[in-house]
């Protein structure tokens, strides 16, 4: 199950550079994770300063 980014995202970009599959991209109000590309490694969750990234 892919990770997801909640409304707590502050668009800091920390997660995007950590993603080994480039599944994370910036949206208008927050970053988004492509569930088809996400490999559930958790690298993004570990670096998110606001805890906005959650499993599934």
Image: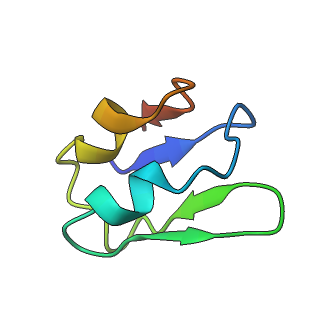
Q: Is residue 48 above or below residue 3?
A: above
Q: Quadrant of residue 52?
A: top right
Work out whether residue 37 or residue 53 is closer to the camera in this orientation and state it: 53
The C terminus: image quadrant: top left
Q: Position of residue 53 (x, y in %)?
A: 48, 36
Number of marks present in the image shown: 0
> In the picture provided, is 2 more to the left or to the right than 40?
right
Q: Position of residue 1 (x, y in %)?
A: 32, 46
Work out whether residue 54 or residue 15 is closer to the camera in this orientation and state it: 15
Residue at x 57%, y 25% (from the top left corner): 50
Residue at x 72%, y 69% (from the top left corner): 27
Q: How is the image coloured?
A: rainbow
Q: Position of residue 16 (x, y in %)?
A: 42, 63
> In the picture provided, is 52 more to the left or to the right than 30?
left
Q: Is residue 3 above or below residue 17?
A: above
> In the picture provided, is 43 more to the left or to the right than 26?
left
Q: Position of residue 14 (x, y in %)?
A: 44, 50
Work out whether residue 29 or residue 41 is closer to the camera in this orientation and state it: 29
Residue at x 60%, y 49% (from the top left corner): 12
> In the picture provided, is 5 more to the left or to the right than 2?
right
Judged from this view, the residue extending furthest toward the top is: 51
Residue at x 34%, y 36% (from the top left corner): 47
């Amino acid at each position: 199950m892919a990770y997801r980014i909640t409304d707590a995202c502050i668009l800091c970009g920390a997660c995007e550079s950590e993603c080994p599959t480039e599944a994370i991209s910036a949206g208008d109000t927050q970053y988004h994770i492509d569930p088809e590309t996400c490999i559930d490694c958790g690298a993004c969750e570990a670096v998110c300063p606001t805890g906005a990234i959650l499993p599934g």
